[in-house]
Image: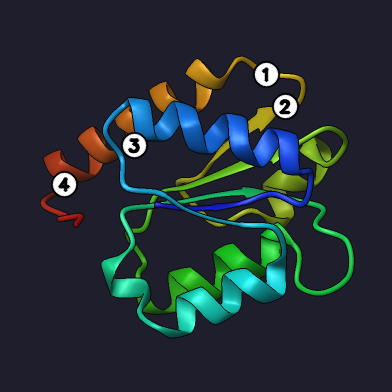
C-alpha cells in the first residue's frame, strides 16, 4: 500500500491506521517520492492512497494515472480538502474520494471495500 501525503501528521495517522488494519504500508511525503517508489514496481502495490494537492511536483491525480497505466485494477483513494469538485474529471475510474477532515476508519473501510470488489471481479493484490 502506498500512502502519499505532504502533511506529516496526516501521513503518520493514515499509515498507522492502515498498518493496524493489517496492510503493509510505504508512506512518502511527495509526488516525486511516490513516482520514485512506483518506478520500482507498481505491480506489487495493493493500493494507492494519495492526497490530491502535494505541493511542488506531481499531484495525486497524476500519481493515480501513472499507477493505473501499469495496473488498471489498482484501488485508488484520493484525500482532499478542496478538490472534490475536480474528481469526476481528474480522478481515475473506480476510485474513491474522501474529504478532509475525515476519520481514518473511512480510508480503511473504503480500501477494504475496493479490494473486496476487485476480488469479486477476479483481480488480485499482493
Task: Please name the residue that numbered disc 4 is placed on.
Answer: 121
| Inter-mark Cα distance, 3 to 2 | 17 Å
Residue at 51% from the left image edge and 38% from the top image edge: 15
| Inter-mark Cα distance, 3 to 1 | 18 Å
| Inter-mark Cα distance, 4 to 1 | 28 Å
Q: Vertical placement of 74 versus 62: above or below?
A: above
Q: Is residue 80 left or right of residue 56?
A: left
Residue 114: numbered disc:
3
Residue at far bottom of view: 39
Mark toward the start of the polypeptide (3 vs 2): 2
Mark toward the start of the polypeptide (4 vs 1): 1
Q: In which quarter of the image is the C terminus?
A: bottom left
Mark 4 vs 3: CB contact within 8 A? no
Task: Please name the residue that numbered disc 2 is placed on.
Answer: 99
| Inter-mark Cα distance, 2 to 1 | 6 Å
Mark 2 vs 1: CB contact within 8 A? yes
At label 4, counting other C-alpha atoms closer than 10 Å, the crowd grade (few under 14, some 14-19, many 20 or more) is: few
| Inter-mark Cα distance, 2 to 4 | 27 Å
From the image, state whether disc 4 or disc 1 is nearer to you. 1
Amino acid at each position: 500500500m502506498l500512502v502519499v501525503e505532504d502533511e506529516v501528521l496526516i501521513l503518520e495517522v493514515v499509515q498507522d491506521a492502515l498498518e493496524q488494519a493489517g496492510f503493509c504500508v510505504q508512506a512518502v511525503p511527495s509526488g516525486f517520492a511516490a513516482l520514485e517508489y512506483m518506478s520500482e514496481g507498481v505491480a506489487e502495490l495493493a493500493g494507492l492512497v494519495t492526497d490530491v494537492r502535494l505541493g511542488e511536483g506531481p499531484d495525486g491525480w497524476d500519481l493515480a494515472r501513472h499507477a493505473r497505466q501499469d495496473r488498471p485494477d489498482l484501488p485508488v483513494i484520493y484525500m482532499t480538502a478542496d478538490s472534490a469538485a475536480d474528481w469526476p474529471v481528474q480522478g481515475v475510474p473506480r476510485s474513491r474520494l474522501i474529504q478532509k477532515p475525515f476519520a481514518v476508519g473511512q480510508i480503511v473501510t473504503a480500501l477494504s471495500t475496493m479490494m473486496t470488489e476487485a476480488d469479486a471481479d477476479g483481480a488480485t493484490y499482493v
